């Protein structure tokens, strides 16, 4: 990472660049995140429900009574691949940073100091969301959710009206991001959906109308929109902070409600996934991953990560929805 990059420039007899890098990387800092833990660090106790709050934060989703059950439609399952990011000095993970917008920081960024790139074939990025979606659906079913088949969701008339981004498109202004994470500060993110679903674009009154129609057409109690952020950190596959699961439902009065759980801590695989990791001038540290190993290790990290999310969601099928019988007129609005 940053330290290795600096050593690379010194070894290549570019001391002026190295000096500028040191100054640039000492730019604005706002405290640092702790490095994420590995799957092996999760013992039986830390996989339990009390530990779920360590990794996932509930933002406005009420709890359901024990024994409730909801019919759930996953309307989006998109994977956000962090393909470019920045670290702080010596691989630190600042909460925020603007060092590359200073003169010296701009030069260090230009030559690649502190930058980290993920090289992964588009085909791999497009295939993984389907496998991750299937794993998440199974884990939801295991705790009592009734999952509406993906094909049925995608075929719903209202679903055809959803605006979407092109699969593989990058967030347009991500390069301006100053907010850091425990896996570095994302500077480019590419998004791929599970096959058959869309990368959903936007919210607002029109989107709310479509959600209301989908609840009716699918006979669903709850709709879920999942954004899973992944990447590579220090050579390990990562499932990352800022992943989210957003739920939408109707309350007893027929009002559309929503809330989400959001990941507040990342988790790393136990084995490294890099086929090659080298520093390239003007690019930074380039992580070329082994596709099969990346898939294996990402799935291995995602399973416990998703389990912690599901444990959070297990108590979030709303009382308004979950306490209603299957033939409730609320689902037929």
Image: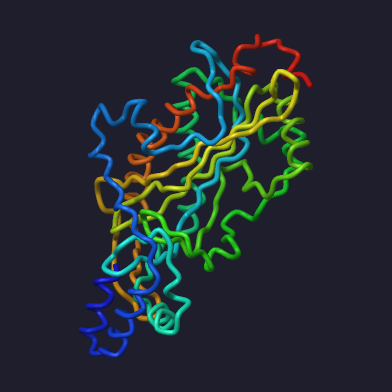
Write the residue at 35% across / 27% down: 50
Where is residue 152 shown, x and y percent of the image? 66, 29
Q: Position of residue 195 (x, y in %)?
A: 57, 43
Above-or-below relation of 227 to 155: below
Q: Quadrant of residue 233?
A: bottom left
What residue is rendered at 45% in x and 58% in y?
82
Q: Position of residue 243 (x, y in %)?
A: 48, 45
Depth check: give the residue in front, 227 or 31: 31
On the image, which quarter does residue 223 sit in? Answer: top right
The colour scheme applied to this rendered structure is: rainbow
**Percent of width and height locating residue 278:** 29, 71
Instruction: From the viewer's perspective, tell me whether residue 168 is left or right of residue 308.
Output: right
Q: How many numbered callouts?
A: 0
Residue sitting at 41 percent across and 77 percent down?
109
Tell me which corner region of the image, top left, top right, bottom left or bottom right, holds residue 246.
top right
Quadrant of the frame with the N terminus = bottom left
**Which sits in the foreground, 198 or 251?**
251
Quadrant of the snapshot with the C terminus: top right
């Amino acid at each position: 990472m940053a330290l290795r990059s600096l050593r690379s420039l010194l070894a290549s007899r570019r001391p002026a660049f190295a000096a500028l890098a040191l100054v640039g990387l000492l730019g604005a800092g706002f405290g640092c995140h702790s490095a994420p833990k590995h799957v092996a660090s999760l013992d039986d106790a830390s996989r339990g429900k009390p530990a779920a709050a360590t990794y996932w934060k509930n933002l406005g989703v009420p709890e359901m009574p024990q024994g409730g059950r909801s019919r759930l439609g996953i309307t989006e399952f998109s994977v956000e691949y962090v393909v470019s990011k920045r670290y702080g000095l010596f691989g630190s993970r600042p909460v925020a940073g603007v060092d590359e917008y200073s003169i010296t920081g701009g030069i260090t960024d230009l030559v690649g100091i502190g930058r980290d790139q993920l090289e992964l074939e588009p085909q791999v990025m497009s295939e993984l969301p389907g496998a991750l979606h299937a794993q998440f659906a199974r884990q939801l079913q295991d705790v009592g959710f009734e999952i509406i088949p993906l094909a049925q969701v995608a075929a719903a008339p209202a679903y055809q009206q959803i605006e979407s981004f092109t699969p593989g498109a990058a967030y347009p202004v991500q390069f301006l991001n100053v907010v850091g994470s425990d896996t570095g500060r994302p500077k480019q993110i590419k998004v791929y959906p599970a096959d058959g679903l869309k990368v959903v674009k936007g919210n607002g009154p029109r989107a709310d109308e479509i959600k209301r129609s989908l609840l009716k057409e699918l006979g669903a109690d709850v709709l879920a929109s999942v954004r899973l952020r992944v990447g590579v950190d220090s050579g390990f596959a990562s499932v990352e902070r800022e992943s989210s699961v957003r739920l939408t439902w109707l309350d007893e009065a027929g009002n559309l409600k929503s809330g989400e759980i959001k990941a507040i801590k990342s988790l790393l695989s136990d084995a490294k996934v890099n086929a090659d990791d080298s520093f390239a001038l003007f690019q930074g540290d380039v992580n070329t991953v082994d596709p099969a190993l990346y898939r294996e290790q990402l799935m291995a990290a995602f399973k416990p990560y998703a389990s912690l999310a599901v444990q959070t969601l297990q108590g979030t099928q709303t009382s308004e929805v979950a306490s209603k019988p299957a033939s409730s007129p609320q689902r037929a609005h």
